[in-house]
Amino acid sequence: MNIFEKIRDEIKQDYYQQNFPNDGQRFVAWYLRNIHLRDRNETKDDITDGADDKQIDAIVIDDDKSTIFIIQGKFIGNGNVDAEPLREVLSSWIQLRDLVRLQEVANIKLKRKLSEVAKALEDDYEIAFELITTSELTSSAQKDLATFQKQLAELSEKDDIVCSISVIDQDEIRRRYDIALERENPSINHTIDLTGSHVMPLTIAGTQVLLAAIPLKECITIPGIKDGTLFQKNVRQSLGLNNTVNKGIRQTIYSDKHRDFFFFHNGITAICNKFDLNNNHLEIHGLSVVNGCQSLNTILSCSERVKELEDTFVLFRFYEIPQRERADRISINTNSQSAVKPRDLRSNDKRVLNLKKSFEQKYPNGYFLTKRGEIAPADKDKRYILDLSDLGKYLIAWHSQRPNISYSETKIFDKYFEQLFKREYKPENAQALNFWMQEINKTWDKENPLGLNETLLAMKAYAPFHHLYAVSMCFAIANNLADRVPNPNKCWEKACQTNMVNEIVKISGISLNMALEAAANEPQPQNRVFSPQNWIKAKTCLAGINFAIRNYFNMLPMIPGGQEIKNKLNETLTIGQEDFEYRWAAD
């Protein structure tokens, strides 16, 4: 079964038939669910296709990759795709440059998404256009793609907004689908044609090594660049195209100095489980690039220009390294010439190491993960495994009372790190936050036990931290100390003693839901629509959550059995004033 037939068969499922009116939308929804791995609610929220969609079928805002994906779909069984869809993509970019005007003429779903796009652009997200099709481009459309890539590069320099365009055809969809199936542990096998390359095989320290000056156009044939699977052993993924080094790479590619690329570039380091050199073909098994992620992503963004380049090479170092520990050391050392993400840089901070030591001494069956990609030993209790990144998000939601910032790992470990980690933090408080969040996450599964609004469920990357904030505010409001922050461990212990953990999590979740629905019903200025994603990322949402909690408490005696619940809540939520402190400033 080819990919078109597979998609055509799968979009007959009830989810696609009941939520999307035509096969075009169902195809885009299938792509979002199976390739971008969006859940059911996120997918419905991302689709903007319909009347006045302005050639934008879906928008995905990926906070982990700091990228806005603008998606246009063409679900075609036979024939090729001409340049018209590419022109539609370029038209989308022209319109996106004037968001105010575009919002005035767009449909409701697109208007709301555009407000989220504006917020993301303020945080320097890049834009990636994806034309997805189950067919292939005509030869003339391929030429137009090269032209459009160059135009987007020029516009990016002019507007200082980095954007790129990729055509995801049936072969690429199939490849991405296969990789998505094994996303947790992908293995890439690839054969590189070394005809025209300059090659030198070596054996160093008992290790097979191949040094090769490879044509730049051969790089774009390597799978796993855009989705990051090629860089699974790298200490970081793509940092985007909007930095000085990557801008310089693009400029060289489009300039008449492209033949000097080999001399300007430090080279790319790749490791694999095994490689074989046969008749100018390098067969690689278990390929991973540990240094060169930024370069390969930038080269791919200029793919059509790169295909035209002759006598333009880049240095590759291939190492046959099947040992994982040795591969990890190579990845770390080959990336030491430039900074990694703020979270990575903080992993060896003495305050973090001190917290790790105290946490694991307090909980011998637990484990504190400080490094990205680190895996806890199999004999540890999963309930007591805590990740540094997660803890940072919990701290800013609970102690700084700013859950609207929790989604941004960069801000937490860069701008706010000193405020969050300047003091010695008790391991029992860290684990209490871990426990609270584990209970909260149980209510955010597909069963939706709290009956949360579908729009709220589509914000699973952000909203659970507001749920955690609401738990803390239940204690603060009940003690008439709304300007203070309760001790997480005292709250957890008290809730466990009275068997009220589930009830508090329930009240907090319902209050968050009520706050969102109240905000959505407020009148909006002309040509403005309410954006749940922008509301959840704004500080103004906190007042709505607090009001909803107070309102819930006041309404309890009016429902059957409510007074009994309120009495037990009062007993549970009442803790000593010594168990409160002022919030940690983070804005």
Image (cartoon, rainbow, N blue to C red):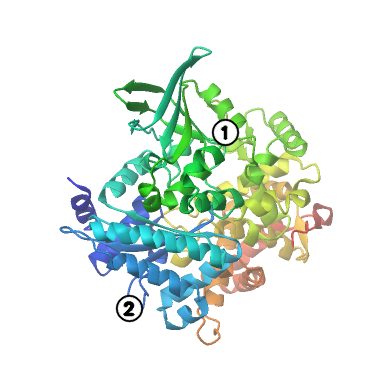
| Image disc number at residue 155 | none
Residue sitting at 47 percent across and 54 percent down? 254
Which label sits in the foreground, 1 or 2? 2
Is 54 above or below relative to 412?
A: below
Give how far across and how far down residue 289 sits, in percent.
48, 34
The secondary structure type at the circle numbered 1 is: loop
Label 2 neighbour load within 10 Å: few <14, some 14-19, many 20+: few
Residue sitting at 50 percent across and 38 percent down? 262
Residue sitting at 70 percent across and 58 percent down? 573
Looking at the image, can residue 560 be seen? no
Q: Split into 4 quadrants, where in the image is the C terminus?
A: bottom right
Looking at the image, can residue 392 be seen? yes
Query: Is residue 393 rendered to the left or right of residue 205?
Result: right
Kindly give the residue lying farthest to the right in the view shown.
Answer: 578
Residue toward you, 244 or 174: 244
The secondary structure type at the circle numbered 2 is: loop
Residue toward you, 153 or 163: 153
According to the image, label 1 marks what residue? 374
Residue 485 quadrant: bottom right
**First in sequence: mark 1 or mark 2?**
2
Is 269 above or below relative to 13?
A: above
| Image disc number at residue 51 | 2
Kindly give the residue lying farthest to the left in the view shown.
Answer: 78
Residue sitting at 60 percent across and 73 percent down? 555
Kindly give the residue lying farthest to the top in the view shown.
Answer: 206
Kind of residue sitting beneath label 1: Glu
Give how far across and how far down residue 48 sits, in percent.
38, 70
Query: Is residue 159 rendered to the left or right of residue 345?
Result: left
Give how far across and how far down residue 582 sits, in percent.
81, 58
Query: How many circles with numbers are drawn on the protein?
Result: 2
Inter-mark Cα distance, 1 to 2: 47 Å
Kind of residue sitting beneath label 2: Ala
